[in-house]
Amino acid sequence: MATIYRALWDEPDADDIAEVLRRAARCFGTWARPEAPLDLEADGEWAFTIGPGVMRAVTYRQVHREGVRGFQATARDESEGAGGPRNTWTTTLSVVGDDGGAHVWVENTLETDDVLQRVKVGRPRLVSELLAGPGKHVFGGSAVREEATSVSADVVPALVDVLRSPERTLPIIAFTEPSVGGTPWLDYARRVATRAAGVATVVTLDRAATQAIRAALGDLAVWGGAVRTYTLAPLKSPADGWRHRFFVAQRLADDGPGVVDRLVFSAAQLSTRRRVPALFAALTDARPVIDAEQFAAAEEQWLFDLELEREERREVEKQLSKALGHLDRVARALEREGRSDIYWGAHDAPADDLPEDVQDVSEAVLAARTYLAEWLEVPDGVERELDGIDSAPNAYAWGNSTLRGLRALAEYVKARRIGFGGGFWEWCERGDPGAWPATTKKLAMRESESVANNSRWAKAREFPIDTRVSPDGLQYMESHLKISEGGGDLAPRVYFHDDTAGPTGKVHIGFVGPHYLVPNTKS
């Protein structure tokens, strides 16, 4: 089961908590069954059909404890269509009130047996009804709203202050007016604002405002009909720009609906990593209890995942020990040379250095493309169907493992350029700092015979490459990093071609994506 949307906000000026709870319960009851709204005045459970082959089960539980009162309402929509994927969508509304006002948490999860299924992400309509209620709706230092906000040139300095404020808690998606008309940019902005309600703020900038923000932010700005998502990452120097994703005007003109989907997905994906405040723990007892069969299946999966995590940890600890040993030797060598200042002064990475961590696999690819281009060729398009990977519970771990693997490939290229004579496996086996684990669980330099002899599977491993390497621009790639053994068909893979002895002198990345796109007998 994956969380695909999580909205949190406070209503600090709510004086009558009982009325806030009643209003929220009415919103949920009307949203859950519009034709005959549920009367959520007392604890209860309901089940009914909401469409062909789709059953909705609703539970409502209240809690009254010292200093806190609230409720939790859950709607589970389970498809029963014959022959199609079995999907379970769960929408949960949790509201608590205390001396600080009212606090709201809306979460959407999806459980499916079809990992290939593409779903349209966005806020449940319930969120719109809740935000339409009276009073302020805020999350930390950000207002939570459903409409796009038009920003004029004279307001741009205030917007820049907000973009750079450490108090900001929501990403800001900025749409700019095109230099030439024709693109329905305001309509796209409204669509994103509606679908990303609760997880992002959308602003629109006309041409005068665009000029003002470019004067204020330079290359960190957005202009000429482009769209930029300002995440919560720093916004100080040009080196920060890669973290704030940019869609050029032509991309919006060519595929506006696709860009809208991507913007909403990214905002929703970021929202799933927010920590739920401890005050919602008061509702724990309101959660439905899973049955014994569900528990047994979950326990089996947890034990399997735990063993994988233990194995991963052993590998990481082994690599860490090697790196610390190497670092100690470097420190002692510098001390003998009277250059200890180099060691002790290297704590802060330069602004133009590869980041120490990333949020997901997409960010890892972007970081490698930006900072490792001297050693790695990472063309546009190598990222394939990363939506599911980037929204999975392991998104952060997978992203940083991918970054570590790409960094290892770059370090290998450096070693080749100063005389190392072996291949990537041999270099990793040598145990240099930054090496990737040279084990069959983490690295494969060749595919199995069953893959090589299967034309469909072999074809799936032909990836675009520099024509200096292959005149037809395609290369069959076998070597790959196994970012995770866990994760099933979604487990990330990184396919690459070693051309360090060829005309480019680089390693070429051909594919970064889920295992199911490069199938074998196990997938």
Image (spheres, grey):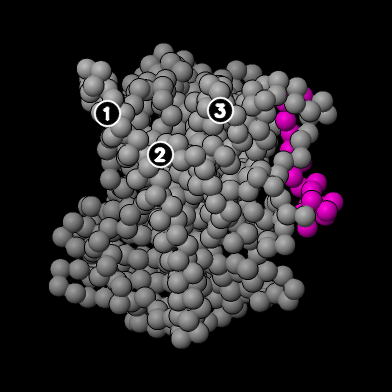
In the image, 512 versus 63, the foreground residue is 512
Residue annotated with mark 3:
420
Looking at the image, residue 261 sits to the left or right of residue 467; the answer is left
Task: Name the spot of residue 486 as percent of width and height, x first.
Answer: 53, 60
Residue annotated with mark 2:
357
N-terminal label among 3 and 2: 2
Check disc 1 and give the amino acid type. Answer: Ala
In the image, 123 versus 303, the foreground residue is 303
Check disc 2 and give the amino acid type. Answer: Asp
**Marks 2 and 1: which is nearer the front?**
1
**Marks 3 and 2: which is nearer the front?**
3
Check if mark 3's residue and mark 2's residue have beta carbons within 8 Å: no
Task: Name the spot of residue 249 as percent of width and height, x first.
Answer: 61, 25
Looking at the image, residue 199 sits to the left or right of residue 413; the answer is left
Check disc 3 and give the amino acid type. Answer: Phe
- Give the magenta-colored segment's residue range: 450-467
